[in-house]
Image (tube, rainbow, N blue to C red):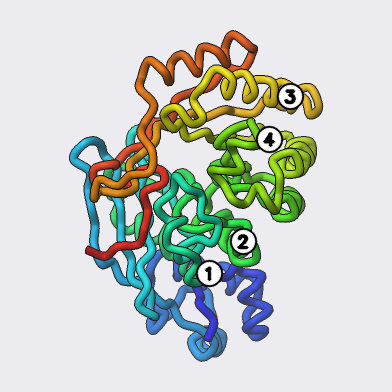
Amino acid sequence: MLALQAVTPEALVRAVPVLTAAEARKVVAAVHRDARLTEPVAQVRRVALAAVRAAGSVPRLEVARELRSALDPFVKLALHTADGHVVETVRIPLERKGRFSVCVSSQVGCALACSFCATGRMGLLRNLETWEIVEQVRIVRRGLDPRRKERVHGVVFQGMGEPLANLDRVLDAIRVLCDPSALAIDGRAITVCTSGNPSGIRRLAREAPKVRLGLSIASARAEVRRRLMPIDKAHPLEEVLEAAEEHARATELAPMWAVTLLAHVNDTPEDARALARMAGDFTARTGVRPRISVIPYNAIDVAGRDPYLRAEPAREEAFRQTMRDHGAPSHKRYSGGSDVGAACGQLVGRAG
């Protein structure tokens, strides 16, 4: 049966041909207002609405647990799927009061096994369906207060999983997220993050050219990156950057490069210089300067067996200063909610 929160009006007309385009827009809007489709929908014929009811439904994810950080306004939601899995979603406060971004998961677990990420320890259990991705945003939106003008401003595909390994469903979800009748989120406020899938990056540029690209770098030094991110063996960083350059030229959007600093692993002056050189070369070839985001490492093993340590503040600042000295400014990303396992790299699918 069709999941009605996972379709655009155009897709709904294809699935239920009795609908007119105008009626499909009304139905999609009603679904995303959480209206009951058992009741009449204004300006939709009864026969058309009956056909929609016969063809589809609005399935739900169950909120198993809501965890509010005591450190900051981040909120993590553990969500039960119908087949018993748990996926995690994070509500991220933005600088402008009342605006939030939603960090969504695209898979249950992840096959890429990046050594600094808790999700990578799970392995891949399955891909999420389009409606399961969209529903994460809808659940966060339900928890906002419209009287205080709170709203979902953006979405980042940086939760559990590798989005480009589930790209068909991610692209379908993006279409729904952006559709004016559905969630009406500006594509430029959506970022799809990847560990490095060249063909997926190129397809993203073709099919979602308004959406931003995020790329996990880890280290610009090949031997270091390969130890931290096994995907580098299949898709070396040079190959990934070629695709990212094509994306930048096609979309004219600056990619976000993420570097999680690990003490005495990838935080050396040599790492900083290599990253600055790589950014300079990228800019020279594309005319687009990447936005480099330096992320403090967040513990991924609360039992005291964590594989890495966070780089000390002085060492982090020295890393960023070296980059500035070589013409590559960066910003420090605030990765909130670490006390409830909501920070970058910590999502691991626990209901308890």
Going by the numbered disc 2, the residue's amino acid type is Ala
Which quadrant: the C terminus? bottom left
Within 10 Å of disc 3 (Cα), the crowding (few <14, some 14-19, many 20+) is some
Q: Does dot 2 land on a helix, a strand or a loop?
A: helix
Seen from this angle, which residue lies furthest top? 325
Residue nearest the viewer, comparing 93 with 342: 342
Q: Where on the picture, by quarter, is residue 351?
A: bottom left
Determine which residue is flagged by label 3: 283
Q: Earlier in the sequence, mark 4 or mark 3?
A: 4
Q: Earlier in the sequence, mark 4 or mark 1?
A: 1
Going by the numbered disc 1, the residue's amino acid type is Asn
Pointers 1 and 2 in contact (C-beta within 8 Å): yes
Side of 197 relative to 29 (left or right): right
- Residue in the picture at 66% in, 70% down: 10
- Residue in the picture at 46% in, 56% down: 120
Residue nearest the viewer, comparing 231 with 82: 231
Whether 116 is drawn above or below 253: the answer is below
Q: Does dot 3 land on a helix, a strand or a loop?
A: helix
Determine which residue is flagged by label 2: 165
> Where is residue 68 shown, x and y percent of the image?
22, 48
Pointers 4 and 1 in contact (C-beta within 8 Å): no
Side of 129 relative to 11 (left or right): left
Pointers 2 and 3 in contact (C-beta within 8 Å): no
Q: Earlier in the sequence, mark 3 or mark 1?
A: 1
Distance between mark 1 and mark 2 Cα atoms: 8 Å
Determine which residue is flagged by label 1: 127
Within 10 Å of disc 1 (Cα), the crowding (few <14, some 14-19, many 20+) is many
Going by the numbered disc 3, the residue's amino acid type is Thr
